[in-house]
C-alpha cells in the first residue's frame, strides 16, 4: 500500500503549477527581488482578508512575533504571558527582547489558553499577552481581549496555524494590537521557504514594524534604531499571492477531511478535537488524544502512515527554559504533551486514505 504523509506539497504544486510558475516568472522578469510590488500587494491582500488596518510582510513567523513585541516597546524588565503548550518560537520571540516569558496553562478540550488561565499567570510586571490559536482554532478571544483591555496589556495573536480562522466572525489577527502569521511551507498558506507577516491595528505600530524589518530605516542610510534584516523577498510574496485565492477551498477540504475522521473514529476510544462552534476551525492539524498515544503512533508507522506529536514537551519543560522554571507545574499542558497525536490532514488527502488511517487506529488495542 502507498505511504500516507502528513501533507503533500507535491500534489499542491501539481494543482497550482500554472499559477505558481507564472508568478515566479513574473518576478524573475521584473528584476525586482526585495521590497517590491509583490510584497506590497500581498500586504494589502492579507490585511483585507483578515480585516486588519495594516499588514507588514517579514522574513518568518518568528520574526513577526519578535518585531511585534519590539514595536510594542517590550524589553528587559517586562513579563509577557503566553501558553506553555506551543512551539518554542512563541517564547523565543519574548526572550529575544530581553523580556521574560511567563507560561499559562491551557484548556484541555481546545488546547488553547483561556482568559482565566492567562489571568492566573499575570504578574505585576506583565505588559503583554501572546495568545496562540493552536491547530487552526481561535482561542476565546472576547474574554481575552477584555482581560487585556482592562489591565492595559498589549494583546498579540500568534496566528501561525490559523489563517482564515475566526471567532464570532472576527478573523484571527484582527483582535489584538498585532497578529503574527507564519507562511512556513507546511502551513495552510505556505511559501517555498521562510516567510511571515504582521497585522497591526495602529498605523504607528505598523510603521515601527516596517522600520525594524529594514535595519531600523525608513529611508536609505538613515537608521533611527538598531533594526533587523527581515524583509520578505518578492519570489515568496508572489508564490503566496498565487496560492491565496485557493486558500478558502483548501481549508474547506481540510474541514471535510476532519468530518470524515470524526465519523470514522467516533466511539473508538480516542479523544477527538473539540470545536467551540463560535467560528471556523481551519484544521491546520487534526489532533486526537489517547493515553496509548505512543502505541497508536507505532501502529500507524508500521502501516506506512505518518503522524506527529505537536508538542511532546511544553515550553516550560524544554531544556532551553526548564532551569528557569524548576517548580512550575501546568497540569493540562503537561497532560496534553503526553497524549496528543496529529493525523495526516491536507487538501489533497482522499477519502480512502482517511478511511485507512481510521481502520488502523480502530484495530489498535485501547
Image (tube, rainbow, N blue to C red):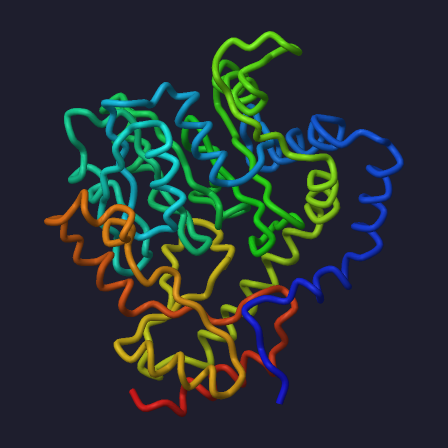
Using the image, determine if residue 226 lies above or below residue 11.
above
Residue at point 46% right, 83% down?
300
**Image quarter for residue 70?**
top left
* Relative side of 144 to 245, left or right: left
Image x and y of residue 352, in percent: 61, 83
Nearest the eye: 280 or 189? 189
Image x and y of residue 139, in percent: 36, 46
Nearest the eye: 216 or 104? 216
Q: Quadrant of the N terminus?
A: bottom right
Residue, far left: 327
Q: How many marks?
A: 0
Q: Quadrant of the C terminus?
A: bottom left
Residue at point 36% right, 55% down?
276
Using the image, determine if residue 129 lies above or below residue 243.
above
Residue, far right: 29
Residue at point 62% right, 35% down?
46
Nearest the eye: 193 or 221? 221
* Relative side of 65 to 97, left or right: right
**Image quarter for residue 54?**
top right
Residue at point 47% right, 82% down?
301
Nearest the eye: 195 or 283? 195
Image x and y of residue 314, in percent: 28, 55
Image x and y of residue 148, in percent: 28, 28
Amino acid at each position: 500500500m502507498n505511504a500516507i504523509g502528513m501533507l503533500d506539497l507535491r500534489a499542491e504544486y501539481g494543482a497550482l503549477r500554472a499559477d505558481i510558475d507564472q508568478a515566479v516568472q513574473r518576478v524573475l522578469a521584473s528584476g525586482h527581488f526585495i521590497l517590491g510590488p509583490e510584497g506590497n500587494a500581498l500586504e494589502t491582500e492579507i490585511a483585507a482578508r483578515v480585516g486588519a488596518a495594516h499588514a507588514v510582510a517579514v522574513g518568518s513567523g518568528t520574526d513577526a512575533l519578535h518585531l511585534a513585541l519590539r514595536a510594542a516597546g517590550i524589553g528587559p524588565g517586562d513579563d509577557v504571558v503566553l501558553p506553555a503548550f506551543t512551539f518554542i518560537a512563541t517564547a523565543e520571540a519574548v526572550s529575544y527582547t530581553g523580556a521574560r516569558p511567563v507560561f499559562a496553562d491551557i484548556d484541555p478540550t481546545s488546547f488553547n489558553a483561556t482568559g482565566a488561565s492567562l489571568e492566573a499567570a499575570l504578574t505585576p510586571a506583565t505588559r503583554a499577552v501572546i495568545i496562540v490559536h493552536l491547530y487552526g482554532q481561535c482561542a476565546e478571544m472576547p474574554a481575552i481581549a477584555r482581560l487585556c483591555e482592562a489591565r492595559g496589556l498589549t494583546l498579540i495573536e500568534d496566528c501561525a496555524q490559523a489563517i482564515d480562522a475566526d471567532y464570532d466572525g472576527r478573523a484571527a489577527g484582527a483582535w489584538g494590537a498585532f497578529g503574527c502569521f507564519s507562511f512556513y511551507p507546511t502551513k495552510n498558506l505556505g511559501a517555498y521557504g521562510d516567510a511571515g507577516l504582521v497585522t497591526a491595528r495602529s498605523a504607528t505600530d505598523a510603521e515601527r514594524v516596517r522600520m525594524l524589518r529594514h535595519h531600523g530605516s525608513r529611508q536609505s542610510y538613515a537608521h533611527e534604531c538598531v533594526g533587523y534584516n527581515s524583509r520578505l523577498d518578492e519570489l515568496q510574496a508572489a508564490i503566496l499571492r498565487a496560492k491565496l485565492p485557493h486558500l478558502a477551498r483548501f481549508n474547506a477540504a481540510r474541514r471535510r477531511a476532519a468530518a470524515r475522521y470524526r465519523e470514522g473514529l467516533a466511539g473508538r476510544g480516542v479523544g477527538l478535537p473539540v470545536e467551540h462552534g463560535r467560528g471556523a476551525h481551519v484544521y491546520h492539524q487534526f489532533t486526537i488524544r489517547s493515553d496509548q498515544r505512543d502505541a497508536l503512533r507505532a501502529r500507524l508507522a508500521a502501516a506506512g502512515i505518518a503522524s506527529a506529536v505537536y508538542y511532546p514537551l511544553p515550553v516550560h519543560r524544554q531544556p532551553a527554559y526548564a532551569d528557569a522554571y524548576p517548580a512550575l507545574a501546568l497540569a493540562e499542558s503537561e497532560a496534553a504533551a503526553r497524549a496528543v497525536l496529529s493525523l495526516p490532514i491536507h487538501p489533497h488527502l482522499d477519502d480512502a486514505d482517511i478511511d485507512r488511517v481510521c481502520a488502523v487506529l480502530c484495530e489498535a488495542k485501547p
